[in-house]
Amino acid sequence: MRSNRKPVHYAVKVLLLITLLGAVSCAGEPPAVVEEEQSFITIEGPGVESTVQLSLEELQSMTGDLVEDDYFSINTYGTEEYFHFKGVWVWAILDKKVDLKEEATAVSFIAEDGYTVTYTLDEVRREDYIDQNNPDKKYKMILAWEENHQAYDPAEGNPFRLVNGQREPGDVNKPLWVSQVKTLKVECREDLQ
Ligand SMILES: Nc1nc2c(c(=O)[nH]1)N[C@H]1C(S)=C(S)[C@@H](COP(=O)(O)O)O[C@H]1N2
Ligand SMILES: [Mo]
């Protein structure tokens, strides 16, 4: 008989109902808001007045200094290959976004894996890097976010790559193309200028 149902059963059913309702309402909610991870580089070191962080968006908005081109490369095996890159002139970043000290002489590009390449500021300023097979070509040193029309995937490391032409014919330049650049450390070393 209905009136004989034990109160405990009723309580269990109510609890079950609440739990089900809870599950349904949770399933209908959007996932917890995860703050979007911003990709950025840090510019620091004894050669800057203060440390600066620049997001991918900020770099992409440097419209007057963006570069898109096919860069010539040679690796240590002598393999020659062109890659298409999109990015921004590194000198423009240092000149316009950072307070450089008078004594600054060089900048180290440091990757997430610790791989580091250092250039003097004079080298960063150069606009006449070459392609040994094409005398008409002139390149600037850039920080790229796109390679062969594909944006770098932030899941595979900081999505910036240092890219440059050759300093002179025969220059093996591909090893200088630092991937996953995280930090630009501006130096005041007198042995580097
Ligand atoms: N962060 C990082 N960048 C790097 C390297 C590295 O070990 N770490 N190797 C360099 C070398 S020696 C070469 S030849 C090229 C290889 O470029 P790829 O990875 O696009 O083939 O990346 C260069 N950039
Ligand atoms: Mo290499």
Image (spheres, rainbow, N blue to C red):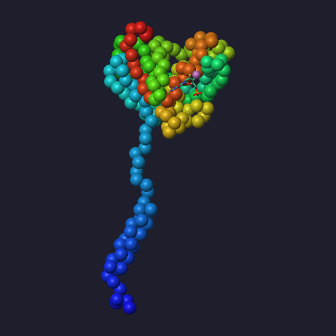
The reply to whether residue 96 is in sight is no
The quadrant of the image that shows the N terminus is bottom left
Residue for point 49% across, 14% down: 123
Location of residue 30 with respect to 125 vertically, above or below: below
Whether 137 is drawn above or below 156: the answer is above
Which image quarter holds the C terminus?
Answer: top left
Residue 17 visible in the picture: yes
Q: Residue furthest top?
A: 191
Judge left or right: residue 159 versus residue 149: left
Q: Nearer the viewer, residue 77 or 160?
A: 77
Looking at the rendered structure, the number of numbered marks drawn on it comes to 0
Q: Residue at x 35, y 72 (%)?
A: 15
Residue at 62% x, 27% y: name it: 83
Q: Is residue 82 above or below residue 136?
A: below
Residue at coordinates 41% horizontally, 13% vertically from top-left?
Answer: 105
* Quadrant in the picture for residue 192: top left
Ligand 2: give its quadrant: top right
Q: Position of residue 59 (x, y in %)?
A: 46, 31
Q: Position of residue 159 (x, y in %)?
A: 50, 33
In which quadrant of the rendered view does residue 175 lie? Answer: top right
* Whole-percent x, y for residue 132 in the image: 65, 14
Vertical arrangement, residue 192 with respect to residue 88, above or below: above
Q: Residue 130, image x and y in percent?
A: 60, 15
